[in-house]
């Protein structure tokens, strides 16, 4: 597949695809005799991994390190496992913070919805996390 086809298929700009390759988030893509990038199924697999991990918030440097370790061979399996495990832990912590924020927003929304129906705002629960107060 050409870079244009890959860009359209995944909804990612061609500049982003070039960047991912340049910084080492995905392996170097093979090229035709004319120098045009020719994405293989393996290239697309790496791209899908990079897009998935970036959408989950993993930093670029983590993906670069993972690919570097992968290229070094099976002796780096323990390091890759450690890297992925650490990222999983960070994502779970992020998920917990998001869930706490959603709970606070749900509470605020329910108070405002009740206030719209009754004409009275009543904050009957303590705030679930620090911030700007009830209003």
Image (spheres, helix red, strand yellow):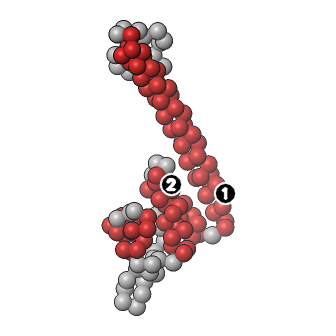
**SS label for mark 1:** helix
Residue 133 in percent (x, y) is at 37, 16
State the residue lying farthest toward the front.
117
Which residue is found at the position 37% from the left and 85% from the top?
A: 35
Mark 2 and mark 1: Cα distance apart in space:
19 Å
Give the residue at x 48% y 34%: 98
Tell which of 101 and 69 is nearer to you: 101
Picture quadrant of residue 108: top left
Residue 101 x/y as whole percent: 46, 29
Label 2 vs label 1, nearer the camera: 2
Q: Can residue 68 be seen from the camera position used here?
A: no
Q: Which residue is rendered at x = 40% and y = 91% of the image?
A: 33
Residue, disc 2: 53
Report crowding for label 2: few under 14, some 14 to 19, many 20 or more residues within 10 A (C-alpha). Answer: some
Q: Nearer the viewer, residue 59 or 124?
A: 124
Vertical comparison of 101 with 21: above or below: above
Residue identifier under label 1: 78
Residue at the image position 51 percent from the left and 78 percent from the top: 40
Q: Residues within 10 Å of mark 1 (few under 14, many from 20)?
A: few
Picture layout, residue 113 above or below residue 32? above
- The quadrant of the picture occupied by the N terminus is bottom left
- Give the tally of numbered discs: 2
Give how far across and how far down residue 16 sits, in percent. 36, 64
- Vertically, is 120 above or below 58? above
Quadrant the C terminus occupies: top left
Residue 115 visible (yes or no): yes
**Of marks 2 and 1, which one's residue comes earlier in the chain?**
2
Q: Please name whichever residue, 30 or 114, is drawn nearer the observer in this view of the structure.
A: 114
């Amino acid at each position: 597949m050409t870079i244009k086809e890959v860009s359209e298929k995944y909804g990612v700009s061609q500049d982003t695809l070039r960047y991912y390759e340049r910084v080492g988030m995905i392996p170097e893509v093979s090229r035709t005799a004319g120098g045009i990038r020719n994405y293989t199924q393996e290239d697309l697999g790496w791209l899908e991994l990079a897009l998935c991990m970036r959408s989950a918030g993993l930093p670029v440097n983590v993906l670069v390190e993972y690919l570097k370790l992968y290229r070094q061979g099976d002796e780096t399996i323990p390091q890759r496992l450690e890297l992925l495990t650490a990222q999983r832990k960070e994502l779970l912590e992020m998920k917990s913070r998001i869930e706490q924020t959603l709970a606070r927003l749900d509470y605020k929304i329910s108070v405002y919805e009740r206030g719209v129906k009754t004409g009275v705002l009543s904050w009957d629960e303590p705030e679930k996390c620090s911030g700007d107060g009830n209003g």
